[in-house]
Amino acid sequence: MNDALDVALRLLIVFVVFLTFPLIIGQTEHKVMAHMQGRLGPMYAGGFHGWAQLVADGVKFAQKEDVVPAGADRRVFQLAPAVALLPYLVVLLAIPIGPGEGAVGEVVDAGVFFVLAVMGVGVLGSLMAGWASANKFSLLGGLRTAAQLLAYELPMLLTAASVAMAAGTVSLPGILDAFEWWWLPWQIVGAVVFFVAGLAELQRPPFDMPVADSEIIFGAYTEYTGLRFALFLLAEYAGIVVLCGLTTVLFLGGWHGPWGADGLGWVWTLLKTALLAFVVIWLRVTYPRLREDQLQKLSWTLLVPLSLAQIALTGVVKVVIQ
């Protein structure tokens, strides 16, 4: 019974994190963008510093009518938001935030490949939405999503494999147990490639070609309204939490940090994750959207060669050490 209670408690904590952290990221994005771009609206809702902006957005989405196009594949159309959102909940179960088995929802032996495979399932929600909407712009957005998935899944997998090679394990807690600070200089290229490829998989600016509102209205999500559209937005912010958490675990040492990492391990994990989330928001307000050809060229001519070079460097370092 104690084991069952322990598992239930950890699952409950992961579920609470899943419900709250994406909303915190969304609220932070409102405020950061308001400051960086001089936006006044998000700073007024509710009074002090616009604290009620997130509540106002939630009420707005809840009040909107749930519309399904007459020509749409109804079941696929309604299922797509859940397919886009729920994989990130599953991934959060495998991300350790501190030392010991108690700091992870579920220890997965093949954790690296598990989380990357499940994150790929989340992209299928956009493909389903684009295909089922009976809208040519939505279909075009879905096709762009598929092209991005094919282009950027490979560098993500290769750079994650380089870390697993360095640690000698594909378990996420095992990678953190083997982590050494001197890894940072020679794994930094892999970290940048992984992070950039993750942004493209999440379709975050400047890699938001599948949802380019000025070109294809809003891509795969054009026909969605109300809470179903809100679920796609929530999936985007949940993806930011997952991407930043994985980058922290794989490349930044996770719970490792100065001044007593064993006791403050979870604090270091959250601080590193929050810093990377700020970078995600910063990139959105800094760089313009790439063209489709530029997006593909970045992956196949730069990120993939860099990820292969990272694996080669990791092999050389491992041989020299041994």
Image (cartoon, grey):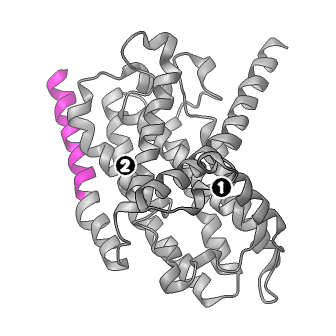
Q: Which residue is mark 1?
A: 234
Rendering quarter of residue 122: bottom right
* Amino acid type of the residue that numbered disc 1 sits on in the rendered structure: Leu
In the rendering, which numbered label is found on residue 194?
Answer: 2
231 relative to 310 in the view: left or right: right
Viewer-closest of 103 and 29: 29
What kind of secondary structure does the magenta stretch mostly adopt?
Answer: helix
Report whether residue 238 is seen.
no
Give the image location of residue 308, x and y in percent. Answer: 25, 51
Residue 171 vs 98, above or below: the answer is below
Residue 232 vs 12, above or below: the answer is below
Give the image location of residue 296, x and y in percent. Answer: 33, 72
Instruction: Examine the structure image and report whether residue 137 is included in the region drawn in magenta.
Output: no
In the rendering, which numbered label is found on residue 41?
Answer: none
* Callout 2: SS: helix
137 relative to 283 in the view: left or right: right
Image point 44% across, 46% down: which residue?
Answer: 278
Report whether residue 134 is seen.
yes
* Amino acid type of the residue that numbered disc 2 sits on in the rendered structure: Phe
Image point 35% across, 70% down: which residue?
Answer: 288
Image point 62% across, 51% down: which residue?
Answer: 50
Residue span colored magenta? 305-322
Q: State the CA–CA distance, disc 1 to disc 2.
A: 22 Å
Image quadrant containing the N terminus: top right
Determine crowd level at label 2: few under 14, some 14-19, many 20+ residues with C-alpha closer than 10 A: many
Give the image location of residue 16, x and y in percent. Answer: 72, 35
- The answer to the question of whether label 1 and label 2 lie on touching residues, with beta carbons closer than 8 A, is no
